[in-house]
Image (tube, rainbow, N blue to C red):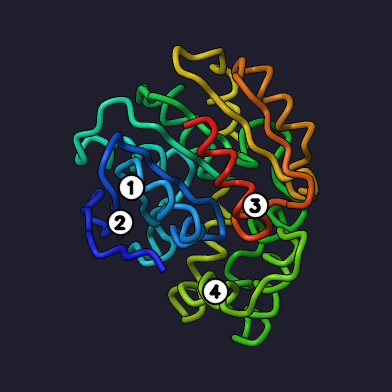
Amino acid sequence: MLDLNERFSFDGQSIAWGAIGEGPPIVLIHGFPWSAQAWRQIAPWLAASHRVYYFDMLGTGHSEKRPDQSVTAAVQSDLLEALIGDWGLKRPKVVGHDFGGLCALRGHFVNGIEYGKLHLVNAVAVLPSGSPFYAHVANHEHAFAGLPDYAHEAMFRAYIQAAAHHPLREDSIRTYFDPWSDETGKAAFYRQIAQADPGDIAEAQARYAPPDFDVHIIWGMRDTFIPPEQGREIEALLGARSFTPIPDAAHIVQEDAPAALLGSLLRTI
C-alpha cells in the first residue's frame, strides 16, 4: 500500500498525499471512485527513476470529506495547481486516470499548468459523458446517501466490478470501499457523483489543441464506461504521440492489467 503520510491544506481542507523515489517529478492522479491506492502497483516501479507524487483528491480516500464541500472537476484542478505549486515542481510528467485525466487536462488548458509529458488512461475528457445512474443520483442525492449500509456496499461493489474486465480481488474491493464505508464516506460518495458537471468537461474540451509537450493515450479496450472511440477522439484533439490499446482491460486498467499499464508508461516516460 502507498503511504499518504503528508497533509496539505487546500482552502482550509486537509489533503492526504505522499511521494517516493528520486529523480524527475511525475504526478499520478486517480479517478472516481478510486483513491491514490489505484497506483499502488505502479508507483513503486516508477520510483526507480522518478520522484513520484500521488494524492487523494478532495473528498476521496483519506482527504477531508464534509457536507458543504464542492468537489467538482473545476475544484479538483485548482487543487492540482495548488499542490504542484506547493511541491515546487516545474513541468512535471503527469498521469491521469478517469476523472484524474480530466483534472490533468483542466490543469493545463484551464489552469495553465505546464507539463513535461501527459499520459491519459481511460480518461474522462470529452462529451458526451455521464450515465443514467449519475443523473439519477444527482436528482436524489440525499436518498442515496441515506441507503442502509448493506445496500450502499452492494451498490459500490457492483459499480466498481462493472469498471473491471476481470473479477476484482476482495482485498482490492476493500481498499477502495473502506474510505466510503462510514456515514461521512457514504455521503461523500454520492456527493462526488451528484456534482459531476458536464460543463467542466465542455470548458476544457473547447480549448483542446496539441500542446508543446508529448501526450500519450493508454486505453483499456473493454471499457464499457468510456468507449475506446472517445480515446481515439482525444488522441486526435491533442495530437497525441501514441495510443496504446490494452486488449484485456476495461476501465480500471490498474486492476485489470497493471503490468501492461506499467510497461506502457515505462516505454514513453
Where does residue 73 sit, x and y in percent of width and height?
48, 42
70 left or right, relative to 168:
left
First in sequence: mark 1 or mark 2? 2
Q: Position of residue 11 (x, y in %)?
A: 24, 49
Mark 4: which amino acid?
Phe
Instruction: Please state which amino acid type lies under the numbered disc 1.
Output: Tyr
Q: Nearer the viewer, mark 1 or mark 2?
A: 1
Q: CA distance from mark 3 to mark 2?
A: 22 Å
Say if 133 sits above or below 217 in the image: below
Question: Which residue is at 21% across, 40% downward?
Answer: 87
Residue at 50% from the left image edge and 20% from the top image edge: 214
Question: Going by the image, does 43 lie left or right of 194?
Answer: left
Q: CA distance from mark 3 to mark 4?
A: 18 Å
Report the residue marked by disc 4: 177
SS state under label 3? helix
Q: Tag 3: residue type?
A: Val
- Vertical placement of 199 versus 239: above or below? below
Marks 3/4 in contact by CB < 8 Å: the verdict is no
Does the rendering let one see residue 64?
yes
Q: CA distance from mark 1 to mark 2?
A: 7 Å
- Mark 2 residue element: strand
Residue 122 versus residue 252 in the image, above or below: above
According to the picture, the residue beneath numbered tag 1 turns out to be 53
| Distance Cα–Cα, label 3 vs label 1 | 19 Å
Q: Nearer the viewer, residue 240 or 208?
A: 240
Which residue position holds label 3? 253
Looking at the rendered image, the disc whose residue lies closer to the viewer, 3 or 2, is 3
